[in-house]
Amino acid sequence: MRSELLHKITTRSAKVGVIGMGYVGLPLAARAAGLGFPVLGFDVSDEKVAALNRGESYIGDVPTSLLSELHGTGNLAATSDTARMAECDLLVICVPTPLNQTRDPDMRFIESAAEAIAATIHSGQLVILESTTYPGTTREVVLPRVAPAA
């Protein structure tokens, strides 16, 4: 499985799923798509999904002209259907982690993303946490949800 995934990454045929199409996720998705990877962006906002599927940007650092081009090549699409995470070889969690009243990261978005991944995860799939949070979050929060037997 590992060598198959590595081959897909090397040949840029690995389908990349980016969870959270905000200020971190959208630029990452655009860069991966620009490098030739097929990218599927996931977001809970139907407005963001619709804009991306029209090739329109809502973030100043990512020009609409770039998204329009990437959408036109078929390398960038968006959805709110988390069942489609099963199509991806790599999933990158880029959800917000706002600080709560005690100035600790609010983990609800990461937990929700991990639970969505758990419903569709398959052997050979790589999951990466890109959200700003404390060291150990992958091991303590994400891993128990996506691989309870690990």
Image: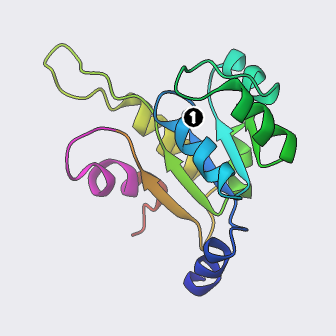
Q: Nearer the viewer, residue 68 or 54?
A: 68
Instruction: Find numbered disc 1 in the image and state the secondary structure of the residue it sits on.
Output: helix
Residue 143: percent from left, percent from top: 38, 57
Dividing the picture into quarters, in which one does residue 27 lie? top right
Residue 88: percent from left, percent from top: 68, 57
> For mark 1, what is the residue?
26
Q: Quadrant of the C terminus?
A: bottom left
Asked whether, in this view, residue 69 is left or right of residue 90, the answer is right
In this rendering, the count of numbered labels is: 1
Q: Is residue 13 above or below residue 145?
A: below
Q: Quadrant of the N terminus?
A: bottom right
The outermost residue toward the left is 102
Q: Is residue 68 above or below residue 33?
A: above
Give the residue displayed 18% in from the left and 13% down from the top.
101
Count residues near mark 1 (Cα–Cα under 10 Å), then give few for <14, some for 14-19, many for 20+: many
Q: Is residue 142 magenta?
A: yes
Give the residue displayed 46% in from the left and 35% down from the top.
24
Q: Is residue 3 above or below residue 31?
A: below
Give the residue displayed 47% in from the left and 28% down from the top.
23
Q: Is residue 114 magenta?
A: no
Q: Which region of the structure is painted magenta?
A: 132-144
Colouring method of the image: rainbow
Give the residue displayed 74% in from the left and 47% down from the top.
84
Residue 133: percent from left, percent from top: 26, 39
Residue 28: percent from left, percent from top: 53, 44
Dividing the picture into quarters, in which one does residue 5 lie? bottom right
Asked whether, in this view, residue 101 is left or right of residue 92, the answer is left
Q: Amino acid at mark 1?
A: Leu
Secondary structure mostly taken by the magenta-highlighted segment of the chain = helix
